[in-house]
Amino acid sequence: MDRSLLTGATFCLLLSFGYTLYALGAGRFRPGLVNLVAILGGFVLLSLDLWIRGRVQGACPINSLFDVLVFMSWSILLIYLVIGPAYHLSLLGAFTSPLVFIVLLFAQLGATGASGPWRMTARDPWVAFHAALSLIAYGAFALAAVAGLMYLVQDRQLKKRKAGTLLYNLPPITDLGVANGRLLWLGFALLTVSFVAGHASGAHVNSVKFLASVLIWAGYGAILFLRLLRRLPPKRTAEASMLVFSMALLALPVIQYLSAPK
């Protein structure tokens, strides 16, 4: 299938990332229109790509590792466009762009479009809803990890009393901590609802995929539970959110391989 839309979206994210590096190097970074337009362009192109492939496949296009990575990239941009402006986290887009760019690049160069365990048909609405909602939850978790990274960067600069262009443009560290926590709650709620939808479908679930999903869900649940008990300070929450998301992201190809029909 033609990947021109996907290539265009990847280029938009590369443009946003490149502009950020250039502006930071020049010492005059002002997050705003350039990043927003590039990210919005990438989101529109990804939306069109998903819509076209969905019509061709006759179902939600989540039928392979390639599809999953593309849909997850779309989910990350969707969550950012919804919550970024609301929390005045314009620089979040600059940190999000390289993540989505890398995921899309890997999807095009490393993943294939072969069918895998996510194969669905139009007669499986609950399965489609479960899979799509799970990946949107991953989008929230990805942004929680990005907000966590921004928190750690600012915390390090503040402790070293090292002011720079990046520090002056970052949101207040308390806002980043709040955003990190709320994104974790959003992702956890979406993932929980997706599990309920998957159970309602009555479809057979591969044991490896189920166990991996439960471990990811439990990992985020543990972070939030410890936060409620005030046993996990914002810095540790930021570190934990990055760690669990990295593990979840690395587990995707493993789950695809182990749960694919032999």
Image: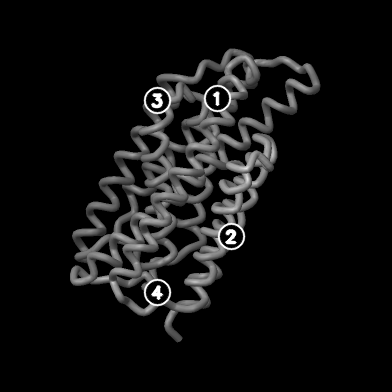
**Residue 83 image offset from top left, x and y in percent:** 40, 32
The colour style of the image is one colour
Compared to 24, does 6 lie above or below? below
Figure quadrant of residue 127: bottom left
Looking at the rendered image, the disc whose residue lies closer to the viewer, 2 or 3, is 3
**Label 2 or label 4, whichever comes before in sequence order:** 4
The amino acid type found where label 3 is placed reads Ala
| Mark 3 → mark 1, Cα distance in angstroms | 12 Å
Residue count near mark 4 (Cα–Cα under 10 Å), binned few <14, some 14–19, many ≥20: some
| Mark 2 → mark 3, Cα distance in angstroms | 30 Å
Q: Residue at x 43, y 43 (%)?
A: 186
Local secondary structure at mark 2:
helix
The amino acid type found where label 1 is placed reads Asp
Compared to 84, does 30 lie above or below? above
**Residue 20 image offset from top left, x and y in percent:** 55, 26
Q: Residue at x 45, y 37 (%)?
A: 13
Q: Nearer the viewer, residue 128 or 24?
A: 128
